């Protein structure tokens, strides 16, 4: 999903991204999209909240004023792609004048669904009307996966949540992420065990929890170590291996595409076809005819 940042008060993306997508809750986070009408002046207040991240997408807002623990800041109309970051426990209030607002809201913290994802974020500095393109793109990608139910999307959601936490920590924390976390490594034996497990269980659902159990690492440390070991995220690596096995089966057997989809861990014929064409530029049928 692409996202074009714009200073225009309304953009088409806000309607496309927000409409019809459910609220998604995961381990330590909740993300939802909102389109709100503003009856002249609208006020929000948050107290004793976990970390709150708001990505503004569009709308017709003429004036916005935010307050963090009693310290206020008055801003020009918000622009598409700007973020508001409210640290955990900070009393937050905002007053908006306009007609409409479209945004994505994300809550992160141990208090959200009993999760431990945000432990170690440290003290954060409040942000009103900030701009961080990588962070905005992560939020957009995470929200775009709200409709996806397959296990690779679930693994990818976990990856993005930790990427968001790392980005927030890097840019806005008063206690940055220790460099040792970025340097965590698997032993050669652990890397080999992971690779063997993934190949052996490609036809099954492979969750992040199952992978972590092989290494005895926390999910956060595991994701850093996996990237260092394989050069990609677990979701990307598993998808590559599934498409590779599908190529092998298409070229070496007469099995129908639905059967191959089941044997390589895809939900159905359509799921395999979409992923296969995105990776190879060919549909499974086209690939088979050329093999």
Image: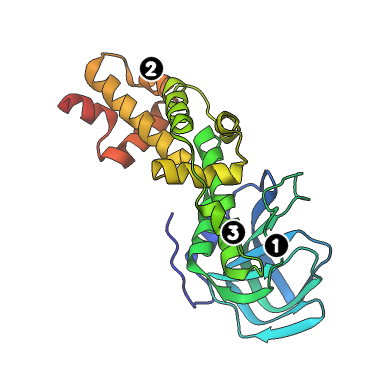
Quadrant of the frame with the C terminus: top left
On the picture, is 289 further left or further right than 104? left
Label 1 crowd (10 A; few <14 / some 14-19 / many >=20): some
On the picture, is 157 further left or further right than 96? left
Query: Judging from the image, what secondary structure is the residue with disc 3 in?
Result: loop
Q: Mark 2 points at which residue?
A: 259
Q: Which residue is drawn at 38% across and 29% down?
A: 242
Q: Name the residue under label 3.
A: 178
- x and y percent of residue 196 in the render? 43, 24
Query: Judging from the image, what secondary structure is the residue with disc 2 in?
Result: helix
Q: Residue at x 63, y 78 (%)?
A: 61
- Labels 2 and 3: the sequence-earlier one: 3
Q: Nearer the viewer, residue 33 or 125?
A: 125
Residue 69 is at least partly visible in this image: yes
Which scheme is used to colour this image of the protein?
rainbow
Circle number at residue 122: 1
């Amino acid at each position: 999903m692409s996202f074009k940042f714009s200073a225009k008060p309304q953009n088409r993306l806000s309607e496309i991204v927000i409409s019809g997508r459910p609220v998604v809750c995961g381990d330590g986070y909740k993300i939802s999209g909102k389109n709100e009408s503003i009856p002249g002046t609208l006020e929000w207040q948050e107290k004793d909240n976990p970390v709150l991240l708001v990505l503004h997408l569009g709308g017709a807002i003429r004036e916005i004023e935010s307050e963090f623990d009693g310290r206020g800041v008055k801003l020009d109309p918000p622009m598409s792609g700007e973020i508001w970051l409210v640290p955990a426990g900070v009393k937050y209030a905002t007053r908006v004048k306009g007609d409409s607002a479209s945004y994505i809201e994300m809550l992160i913290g141990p208090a959200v669904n009993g999760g431990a994802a945000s432990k170690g974020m440290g003290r954060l500095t409040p942000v009103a009307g900030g701009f961080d393109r990588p962070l905005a793109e992560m939020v957009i990608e995470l929200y775009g996966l709200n409709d996806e139910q397959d296990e690779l999307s679930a693994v990818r959601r976990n990856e993005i949540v930790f990427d968001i936490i790392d980005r927030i920590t890097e840019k806005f924390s008063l206690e940055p992420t220790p460099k040792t976390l970025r340097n965590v490594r698997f032993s050669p034996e652990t890397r080999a065990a992971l690779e063997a497990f993934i190949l052996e269980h490609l036809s099954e659902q492979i969750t992040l929890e199952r992978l972590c159990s092989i290494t005895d690492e926390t999910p956060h440390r595991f994701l850093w170590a996996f990237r260092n070991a394989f050069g990609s995220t677990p979701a990307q690596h598993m998808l590559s291996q599934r498409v590779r096995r599908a190529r092998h089966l298409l070229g070496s057997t007469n099995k129908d595409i639905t059967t191959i989809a089941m044997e390589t861990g895809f939900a159905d014929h359509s799921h395999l076809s979409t992923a296969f064409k995105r990776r190879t530029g060919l549909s499974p049928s086209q690939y088979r005819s050329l093999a």
